[in-house]
Amino acid sequence: MWSCVSSNETDDSSDQRLCQDLGLILSFSSLFYLIVCFPISLCYNALLVTVNLCNKVSMTMPDVYFVNIAIAGLVLNMVAPVQLLGPGYTHWATWDFNNEVYITLLILFNISSLVIMYSTTLLSLDYYIERALPRTYMSSVYNTKHVCGFIWGGAVLTSFSSLLFYVCNHVSTKIIECSKMQNKEAADAIMMFIGYVVPAIAVFYALVLILRIRKQSTPLDQDSGRLDPSVHRLLLVSVGVQFALWTPYYATLLVHMLSGIQGRHLHGQHLRTYYFVRGLSKLLAFSSSFAMPLMYRHMNKSFSWKLRRLLNKLHCGKQGCSQERSPEQQVVT
């Protein structure tokens, strides 16, 4: 909870003013996100999922991953209002919530973060496979759908493994099993390693392979079955934006973990500054659900055609419209 009330009476007025200023910055940032970014994020994520699922035949491997990311973004959209209107982010908290609600929000947030990071990671690896071995169907749409299912299953299992530490950190010490597991730093370490370190290493490795193979021009580059070249730009921008928005959040987890291991717990103004940075970092993480669908909308060439096709279907009814052309057909004609 954001509070400038300190038990240390020696805090001077400048520290109190700084604390009030940090609280106001976090409050207005949260309200700006909820008023401007949240509705756009909700609409574009829902639109991305709906348009692609209504055009399953024309979906490609990257489309499946971006639909998976958009679904995770919708989960973040559910968590954001509850958390950002709580006492930890605004001076004018709409409600307060107990430990059970806090843990539920934390589970949903962790699951979404894992799904987003691993979808981006596997998109990079599958893009390399598609570039290196086209028409092998190793990275086909069918296989990718099953991979996305495993991503959600793995994210749930990972979240519940760290959930044990969070739960035992909030329940009574009278439970013998939990008295030995009251270690939030262990939960942060699990999320830090599985949710950030592993995807970062895998993405770096995939990008190195992609850049290496792009320098080697082969006759396969003219293969019509290859992915659209715009996918490469979309991939690079997506990876950069995702890690830029999620790195501050995982950095705060690292700070909390290291301070707990070393026994140097933050106090006073340092603690308030940490809460402020953690709040802003989580706000940036929520912003990933806003940035990704916008990038997909503007950088994916086939999305506009799919959207027009869906609108035509809704307008023409079950009979369908007589003239529907794909982007490839339009180029040929």
Image (cartoon, helix red, strand yellow):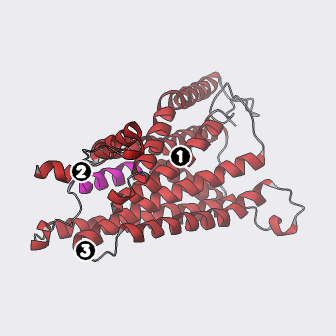
- Distance Cα–Cα, label 1 vs label 3: 33 Å
The residue wearing badge 1 is: 74
Q: CA distance from mark 2 to mark 3?
A: 21 Å
Residue under pointer 3: 135
Where residue 100 appears, as percent x and y from the top left, is 77, 49
Q: Secondary structure at mark 2?
A: loop
Q: Residues within 10 Å of mark 2 (few under 14, many from 20)?
A: few
**Residue 299, how many percent across, how many down?**
28, 45
206 relative position to 229: left or right: right
Residue 77 horizontal/vertical position (percent): 55, 42
Instruction: Say the numbered circle drawn on residue 326.
Output: 2
Three-letter amino acid code at the position of disc 2? Ser
Is residue 100 a member of the stretch shown in magenta?
no
Query: Observer-nearest residue: 227 or 26?
Result: 227
What whole-number distance in Å separates the C-alpha atoms at marks 1 and 2? 29 Å
Q: Earlier in the sequence, mark 1 or mark 3?
A: 1
* Residue segment shown in magenta: 230-245
Front residue of 104 and 29? 104
Q: Nearer the viewer, mark 2 or mark 3?
A: 2
Closer to the chain start, of discs 2 and 3, is 3
Q: Tell whether 249 sits left or right of 159.
A: left
Q: Tell me if residue 145 comes above or below residue 278 in the rendering.
A: below
**Contact check, label 2 and label 3, Cβ < 8 Å:** no
